[in-house]
Amino acid sequence: MSPAEYEARVELAACYRLAAHYRMTDLIYTHITARVPDEPGHFLINPYGYLWEEITATSLVKIDVDGNKVGDSPNRVNPAGFTIHSAIHRSRHDAAWVMHTHTRAGVAVSSVEEGLLPLNQIALQFYGRTGYHDYEGIALDLDERDRITKSLGAHPALILRSHGLLTVGESAGQMFSNMFYLNRACEIQESTLAMGLTPLVVEDDLARHVTAQYDQMAVDDGDLVLEWDAQMRLADRLDPGFRD
């Protein structure tokens, strides 16, 4: 494999290990994928049957947007994972990295009509930047792909109703940060509403202002690069074997 592909594999394996560390897994289900650099139509996905803390750079499976394995990997690919991720990889050229989770808080928020509410600073990162996709059953119908991409639009995040969360990014760091904070916003919303008190909802003008501040900070300070470097150091401390 090329050095660029190996680097993508290392970062993707790190994403799986970090997601396991942050308890964003669902046993062997759900997926994180990455487009293979310099190989149009190819992307990397987890081997079906592996726990996320077991995944390594070389165990990842390379497939095309039609679900065919590229290479001689002995591992299977989950059909539902192929449906959701291939939908985005084939339509959003800026979405080189895609992450989908079934966390408790994420599924909880996806299961209420209001979705993610603008209750706090973390949630405001996604104000006006989150799509919603109505539940159609287990994602096995390839016809659903067009509807998934329409629901996502140009947003960095998608809430799959009665299902879970999805985020995208141009880089591993951007995608993972989007998911970390989207899930955190869902956790905070769950805790806030559980108190049974009247929640404070941030007004539209202020919410849009804070979202713009988040965007400007990312451009000016390079926060995402610093954040991802720190995450990679954490992955190495947890177990550097993900690089194998």
Image: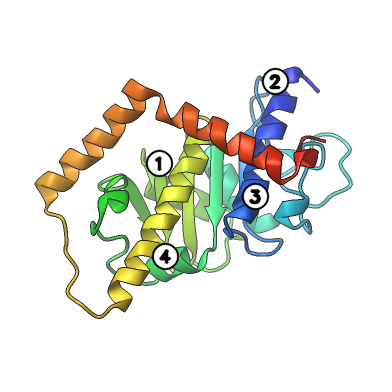
Secondary structure found at label 3: helix
Depth order, front residue of 99/90: 99
On residue 161, the disc is 4
What residue do we see at 65% from left, 49% from top?
Answer: 82
Task: Give the Cα separation between the discs numbered 1 and 4.
Answer: 16 Å
What residue do we see at 31% from left, 47% from top?
Answer: 126
Determine whether, in the image, residue 202 is placed left or right of residue 111. Answer: left
Depth order, front residue of 118/237: 237
Task: Give the Cα separation between the discs numbered 3 and 1.
Answer: 19 Å
Question: Does any portion of residue 193 appear in the rendered image?
Answer: yes
Determine whether, in the image, residue 117 is placed left or right of residue 200. Answer: right
Find disc 1 in the rendering and name its residue. 156
Depth order, front residue of 116/85: 116
Q: Position of residue 138 (x, y in %)?
A: 58, 66
Closer mark to the observer between disc 3 and disc 4: 4
Q: Amino acid at mark 4?
A: Arg
The quarter of the rendered structure image containing the N terminus is top right
- For residue 16, above or below residue 225: below
Q: Amino acid at mark 2?
A: Ala
Q: Earlier in the sequence, mark 4 or mark 2?
A: 2
Question: Does any portion of residue 169 appear in the rendered image?
Answer: no
Q: Position of residue 231 (x, y in %)?
A: 57, 38
Which residue is farthest front? Answer: 237
Find disc 2 in the rendering and name its residue. 4
Find disc 3 in the rendering and name its residue. 82
